[in-house]
Image (spheres, helix red, strand yellow):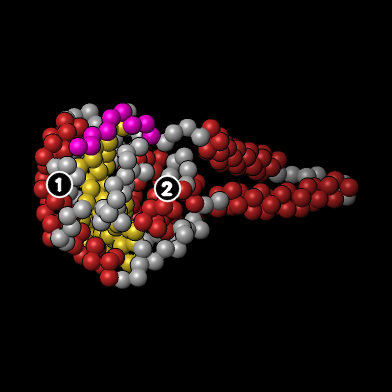
Amino acid sequence: MILKKKNIEITVIAPCYNEELNLSEFYTRIIKSIDEINVKNYELIFIDDGSKDKTWEIINELSNKNKSIIGIKLLKNFGHQNALLSGFKNASGKYILTIDCDLQDPPELLKNIYNKIRNKDINIVSCQRSTRKDNLFKKITSNIFYFLFNLLSYTKINKQVSDFKIFDRKVLNFINSLNENDPFLRGLISWPGFKEEIELFDRPIRKHGVTGWSISKMFNFSMNAFFGFSNFPMRLSFIICFILSIIFIIFGAYAFISYLAGNIVRGWTSIFLVIILFNIFNFFILGLISEYTGRIYLEVKQRPRYLIEKILKK
């Protein structure tokens, strides 16, 4: 862990994954935005989340130019959320800005959100996309995710709010006090009920490179969100099991009474189909139980959420 500085006004945390084409422009724009708010005591933490290009070399070059830059190189790709956590553990600032360096989170927004959190009695300013220029698949899946999460979860999050936000030390200390294995930071930040305001912005299209969010990563991200903040699937399965049990009791009573009355119980095909349906549902329940059990297993083992290979600090 890095020895934290005192009297740092703002810490900018920027996770990177294969961002060699965007890093230099991002650095220029974020430094300009920091100059606009007239903050001299700042730190800029770049986290290389297992990049396969020249991202780390560029971070090294930038750190040679600016002593306020801290570079953290993770041993492998631990994922966006864990990369942010590694930055949180090493942040010294009174305020924390989390921003991706793919240039889809405009650094120029810093002035507005910094002034807002300083001048109002709030803990968080989250940046919400009013428009987004992503492809149709990304838009549809994003809308489905937010709809289902807010429908099923006991914690509500604002639609189209990402990890692009600024928050105070109180929020940071809360996050650092947790030790969840697969964190969903948007949910964790919203769960305690901190005072929050929204800043709308138009999300531009990605200028260089390709997104690091593959379909499998988006799926895992969604699973972590749903299973981390909702026990609705387990509760729903119990309700369905209870209803099916009542139906089968009624059906069994009817068959028994018909047998005593000397009537032939017909409809064995329908009974066979019902049994198949019941077994399918049993396998579904077992799958849910296995998913929750597997997550409990990982939590109990307490493996580190990330491993740091190198730290650059001038």
Q: CA distance from mark 1 to mark 2?
A: 27 Å
Residue 73 versus residue 96 in the image, above or below: above
Could you tell me residue 294's position as x and y percent?
A: 54, 35
- The correct choice, above or below, for 150 with respect to 46 in the image is below
* Left or right of residue 70: residue 218: right
Q: Which residue is mark 1?
A: 26
Residue type, mark 1 in image: Phe
Where does the image place residue 134, in percent across and percent down from the top left? 22, 50
| SS category of the residue bearing label 1 | helix
Q: Main secondary structure of the magenta part?
A: strand
Q: Is residue 205 visible in this depiction of the protein?
A: no
Q: Magenta stretch: residue 257 in it?
A: no
Q: Secondary structure at mark 2?
A: helix
- Nearer to me, 296 or 189: 189
Which residue is at 59% across, 40% downward? 289
**Quarter that holds the C terminus:** top left
Question: Within the image, what quadrant is residue 131 found in?
Answer: bottom left
Instruction: Please say if 245 is above or below 19.
Output: below
The residue under the point 16% across, 38% down is 63
> Looking at this view, is 183 or 211 the one in front?
183
Identify the residue at image location x=52%, y=38%. 299
Give the crowd class for mark 2: few <14, some 14-19, many >=20 residues within 10 Å.
few
Residue at the front extreme, as displayed = 6
Which region shows up in magenta?
Answer: 306-314
- The residue where tag 2 is placed is 176
Foreground mark, 1 or 2, reads: 2
Residue 222 image offset from top left, x and y in percent: 41, 46
Classify residue 5 as left or right of residue 286: left
Amino acid type of the residue that numbered disc 2 sits on in the rendered structure:
Asn
